[in-house]
Image (spheres, coloured by chain):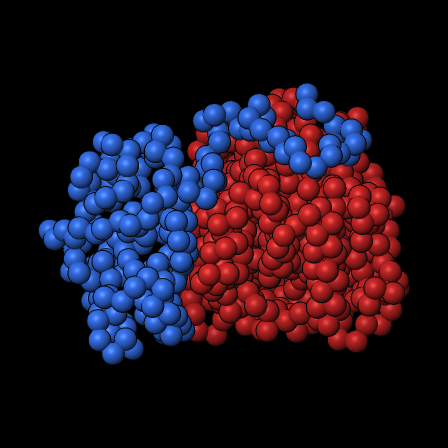
Chain colours: A blue, B red
């Protein structure tokens, strides 16, 4: 089992409380804490991404390709790592996908006329954009559009609250707490029972 | 649990347990008629439903192979998923949002009122609003529709507040929290809505009406229902007389079975129902059952749809509370001065973060996409749903070579917008934008149609046998003991969410079938 340490340079903090509550959920089973991320509730600094088909260096590069396609500047790398995890799993299942990803990373270097990974954030993104429409780009985009937004860390970041049944829905928890517009007429929106 | 023998040829066999099939089954069982109800999907419950968009999608959706063609964007964005409908006991009533609107009088007479629209295959329904009114009343009572039968409307959520403010500023008159088959008070043994915000994922409170939580359990208590989950129907067979007499299906254990039948009612939705009739071709019916007119599968409608999402400076948190929390009905009139015939409804709609990523701009990426997602918590949304034109060339066919897991030809769904659909969508997008800008939006996102949830036509009702597939009772023009009992019957689409009409037609059809059986006419 190979492990890649990825430096996390995004300062944004997401809701640790919520994240912790789901300790048995997505992240716990996916990432291995490098410096006590789960224990300290802090995703910052370093954590380790367990890779199987791809190398640790490739995993780090794929993470930054994903950042280039979906550039949420303040979204923690730990969330992007979930996409890398899924790409790696797909590559482990299908060697053709491993080849697709490797060739794509090579093409990024070609487009950069050198070491794409060594460029700064925006320069990397501008080269990723040039790959739009390729199978490589579409594979990562298509994986990301589910993986990046379907986890509790992302939900906490974007403010989405996820499952509500366990907490009794929003009947007593703010389903009509918007206070910056006038209240509708009672005919249109009857008082709650 | 009632067991009806496979060789018992006295029962009514209903294929599909959704709004049409589930309601019809209960209505017949209440009259003392034995029913075998075949449902391709498994039986879930409020306890097993998930407040998780992708998880629930996998649990409830019909994901068997389908293909697409035509110029609609869904064929490009979701080529293997033309429709977002369900394979589970209760069918898509587990997934629907609950909007329960009557089709308007003028919409039943679309051909007379809209005239000869080039390229459209318009026809008046063989029934009128007056014919259906008593059944609408029964359906509303059965389903507990708010703002009918003295049932108060639901309290509006944050998403509704935004729609309402914009609607009032634009001068719209009819904006409220809708007529919803969601309990605003405890009723019929089901609790009131607790505003979970997961109507599409199966209501975990059972506050939303579905055939799964009402019609089917009620039918079971009569002792007349034999419900068979996991029964995937392959073909309908017929006797030399031409009457249908059996249904062949694969059971939950994967074994092929044949259930004899006195009457067969097809209620698999507007894709699977015509597919089944077409796949049941025989030497006597080489073009498929009930297809002497050649109309089976044709005039597929999916409603003119689209969505408008908008972001605001302050939070909305639209996901809190009912998915479809309010409606503006002012545009559902027929007013050709707007540049199109027919009308549309505007209904609030919320989808969670995972589905917003998938549907906001299918195929989208990059900084603009991310900016919209970054503002998700400040977003309000509405769905636009209007009458689309029936076109003969928009149709369900069976694929020449692609087969499903049971070896049956898969359906191809071909759809292209009619110019009237395009004009209506443009108008609706503009009005949706105006509403949100009036309420203070800082950015507006018109969103293209999702995979179809309102699948209509394909076995349409017609007065003349040559114009359609079934008569005003949903009875096949060609085969007396073969019925269509779902939205496939719709002659035209009208602007309203179709479930209430499907349920009303099923109640009416049950009366007809019972009478015909007692007269020994079928």
Pick out the residue farthest to the left: A1
Give the number of marks: 0
Q: Position of residue B49 (x, y in %)?
A: 47, 36
Residue drawn at (46%, 61%), measured in percent from left and top? B367
Q: Position of residue B281 (x, y in %)?
A: 55, 67
Q: Position of residue B289 (x, y in %)?
A: 61, 64
Q: Is residue B214 above or below residue B252?
A: above
Report which quarter residue B385 is drawn in.
bottom right
Residue toward you, B170 or B250: B170
Residue toward you, B76 or B169: B169
Residue drawn at (69%, 30%), measured in percent from left and top? B155
Residue B163 visible, this angle:
yes
- In the image, taking residue B381 as reference, residue B231 lies left or right, namely left
- In the image, taking residue B168 as reference, residue B364 lies left or right, namely left
Residue drawn at (59%, 26%), measured in percent from left and top? A171
- In the image, taking residue A70 as reference, residue B1 lies left or right, namely right
- In the image, taking residue B450 as reference, residue B402 lies left or right, namely left
Report which quarter residue A90 is drawn in.
bottom left
Residue B385 visible, this angle:
no
Residue toward you, B273 or B242: B273
Q: Is residue B294 above or below residue B335?
A: below
Residue drawn at (50%, 55%), measured in percent from left and top? B371
Q: Position of residue B166 (x, y in %)?
A: 74, 46
Residue toward you, B449 or B490: B449
């Amino acid at each position: 089992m190979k492990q890649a340490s990825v430096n996390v340079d995004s300062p944004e903090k997401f809701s640790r409380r919520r994240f912790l509550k789901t300790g048995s959920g997505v992240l716990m089973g996916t990432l291995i804490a490098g410096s006590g991320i789960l224990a300290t509730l802090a995703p910052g600094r370093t954590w380790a991404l367990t890779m199987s088909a791809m190398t640790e260096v490739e995993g780090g590069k794929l993470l930054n390709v994903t950042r280039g396609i979906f550039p949420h500047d303040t979204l923690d790398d730990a969330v992007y790592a979930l996409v890398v995890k899924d790409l790696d799993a797909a590559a482990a299942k299908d060697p053709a996908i491993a080849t697709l990803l490797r060739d794509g990373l090579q093409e990024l270097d070609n487009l950069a006329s050198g070491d794409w990974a060594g460029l700064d954030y925006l320069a990397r993104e501008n080269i990723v954009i040039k790959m739009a429409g390729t199978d490589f780009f579409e594979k990562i985009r298509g994986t990301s559009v589910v993986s990046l937004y379907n986890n509790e860390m992302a939900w906490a970041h974007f403010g989405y609250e996820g499952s509500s049944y366990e907490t009794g829905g929003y009947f007593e928890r703010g389903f009509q707490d918007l206070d910056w517009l006038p209240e509708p007429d009672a005919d249109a929106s009857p008082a709650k029972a | 649990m009632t067991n009806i023998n496979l060789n018992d040829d006295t029962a009514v066999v209903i294929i599909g347990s959704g709004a049409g099939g589930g309601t019809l089954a209960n209505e017949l069982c209440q009259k003392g008629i034995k029913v075998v109800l075949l449902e391709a999907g498994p039986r879930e419950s409020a306890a097993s439903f998930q407040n998780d968009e992708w998880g629930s999608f996998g649990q409830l959706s019909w994901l068997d192979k389908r293909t697409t063609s035509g110029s609609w964007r869904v064929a490009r964005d979701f080529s293997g998923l033309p429709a977002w409908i369900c394979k589970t006991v209760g069918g898509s009533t587990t997934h629907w949002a609950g909007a329960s609107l009557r089709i308007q009088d003028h919409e039943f007479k679309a051909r007379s009122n809209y005239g000869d629209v080039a390229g459209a295959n318009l026809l008046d329904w063989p029934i009128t609003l007056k014919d259906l009114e008593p059944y609408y009343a029964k359906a509303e009572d059965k389903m507990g529709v708010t703002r009918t039968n003295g049932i108060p409307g639901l309290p509006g959520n944050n998403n509704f507040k935004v729609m309402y403010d914009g609607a009032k500023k634009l001068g719209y008159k009819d904006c409220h929290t809708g007529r919803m088959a969601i309990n605003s008070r405890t009723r019929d043994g089901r609790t009131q809505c607790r505003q979970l915000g997961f109507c599409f994922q199966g209501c975990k409170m059972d506050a939303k009406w579905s055939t799964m939580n009402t019609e089917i359990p009620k039918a079971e208590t009569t002792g007349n229902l034999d419900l068979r989950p996991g029964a995937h129907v392959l073909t309908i067979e017929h006797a030399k007389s031409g009457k249908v007499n059996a249904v062949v299906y694969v059971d939950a254990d994967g074994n092929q079975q044949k259930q004899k039948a006195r009457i067969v009612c097809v209620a698999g939705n507007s894709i699977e129902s015509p597919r089944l009739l077409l796949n049941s071709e025989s030497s006597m019916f080489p073009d498929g059952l009930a297809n002497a007119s050649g109309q089976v599968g044709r005039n597929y409608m999916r409603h003119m749809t689209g969505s408008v999402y908008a972001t605001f400076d302050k939070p909305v948190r639209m996901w809190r509370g009912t998915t479809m929390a309010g409606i503006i009905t002012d545009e559902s009139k027929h007013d050709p001065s707007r540049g199109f015939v027919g009308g549309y409804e505007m209904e609030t709609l919320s989808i969670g973060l995972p589905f917003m990523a998938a549907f906001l701009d299918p195929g989208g990426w990059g900084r603009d996409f991310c900016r919209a997602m970054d503002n998700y918590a400040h977003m309000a949304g509405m769905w636009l749903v209007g009458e689309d034109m029936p076109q003969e060339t928009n149709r369900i066919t069976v694929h020449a070579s692609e087969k499903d897991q049971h070896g049956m030809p898969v359906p191809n769904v071909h759809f292209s917008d009619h110019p009237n659909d395009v004009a209506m969508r443009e108008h609706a997008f503009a009005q949706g934008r105006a509403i949100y800008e009036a309420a203070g939006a800082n950015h507006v996102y018109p969103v293209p149609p999702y995979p179809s949830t309102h699948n209509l036509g394909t076995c349409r009702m017609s007065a003349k046998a040559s114009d359609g597939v079934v008569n005003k009772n949903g009875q096949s023009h060609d085969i007396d003991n073969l019925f269509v009992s779902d939205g496939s019957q719709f002659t035209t689409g009208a602007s309203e969410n179709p479930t209430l009409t499907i349920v009303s037609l099923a109640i009416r059809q049950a009366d007809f079938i019972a009478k015909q059986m007692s007269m020994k006419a079928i």
